[in-house]
Image (spheres, rainbow, N blue to C red):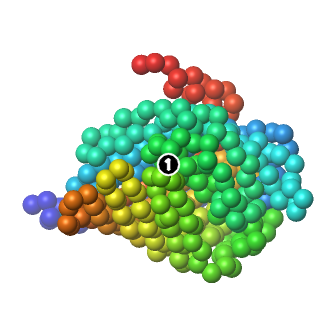
Amino acid sequence: MKKKRLPIFVVFIGVLLSSVFLGLARGAEQHRVALPDVVPLKLRYNVGETLYYRLVRQNNNFRMDGTKSGEMKVVTYFTRTRLPDDGQGRVQEKFVWKRFEFGQSLTAAPAKLAEFKGGEGFSLIYSVNDGDAIHRLDFTSLPRTFEGFFFMILTWDAVTFDGLTRPTQYLSVPDTAPIGAEFKETREAPDLIFSYPPLVSESRYHFSGKGWIRVNGISMIKGMPCVIVESANLENTVEMNISIQSMNIKTQGLEHFWTKTYLSLADGRIVRGELVGSVAMIQDVRMLGREKPDHSEFMVIGYLDMDLLSEAEFTAELNKARKPE
């Protein structure tokens, strides 16, 4: 019986939507907004000024039959302060982490967050205009623990959105561009080699070079007019080798991710960044004395959200996080 009524319902919804769209169209005729021919993209907030950010990453693990098998969650707060440009005219900033909370669950239960105190006060100098800067970051001061390793990996999240919107020696992003403009890196598919001895031996993230970056329009975020820059990175691969006492874990995966970055029209600062990605992974765990490794296959769906906060919002959230429950 429901199937017989469905077409009538669909027609009703179609008529309703049509009337809504007609109303919107009439309203648009009365309130036209002229889009600029070009929009600014350059990062140009003042030297000495400090920006405040909250970053949240949520990774959900799924077995190949679709059932959830675990999750990882990170909540971190950091600042970035504009320094004088370097001798080559490139933007320089100081990043300082104020709090880093990390949690992991190996079941369908939610991860419980705990503070990683080794990350508090960690800082680095970084140029968003240097495509090789990430290779030179120094993490030797971090404790040689898994929490330290994950902190290192996840600090890269703080510059992910800049890496897809700022000009470097490999990416020609102009100071201004028309809506619809697209950009692409000129270098051949690069590798990011990383390690974290003695826990993680030489591992590799390979960027396939397949993807795009596009200026998609203008939107209001937190009351601020922003340029929307979207991107896709497809068919990247990862290989990671972890050693824990008598156990060796080898992981391989294929990743795709998509981003949306909102840049302030006023000065190019990031007001919000959104990322969603999927990684198909295989993992072999080899134990000392066992002839064959334990083999597993799973999918990770990851979400990353980075938000600009006011100094007051930043302080209030930090104070709340530091209060014992």
Amino acid at the residue labelled 1? Phe
Instruction: Give the percent coordinates (x, y) of residue 160.
Output: 60, 57
Say which quadrant the N terminus sits in: bottom left
Instruction: Give the percent coordinates (x, y) of residue 156.
Output: 58, 54
| Residue 103, quarter of picture | top left
**Front one among 144 and 51:** 144
Q: Farthest residue in the right direction?
A: 87
Q: Residue at x 43, y 67 (%)?
A: 239
Q: Please give left or right for residue 163 compared with residue 36 in the image.
A: left
* Residue 5 vertical placement versus 271 (above, below): below
**Front one among 130 and 241:** 241
Q: Please give left or right for residue 154 compared with residue 31 in the image.
A: left
Say which quadrant the C terminus sits in: top left
Instruction: Give the percent coordinates (x, y) of residue 133.
Output: 70, 60
Say which element carries label 1: helix
**Front one among 9 and 289:** 289
| Residue 164, quarter of picture | bottom right
Q: Please give left or right for residue 24 compared with residue 325 in the image.
A: right
Q: Residue at x 20, y 66 (%)?
A: 291
Mark 1 neighbour density, 10 Å: few (under 14) some (14–19) many (20 or more): some
* Residue 21 vertical placement versus 210 (above, below): above
Which residue in the structure is indicated by mark 1? 149
Q: Can I make out residue 189 in this image? A: yes
**Front one among 190 and 316:** 190
* Residue 277 vertical placement versus 97 (above, below): below
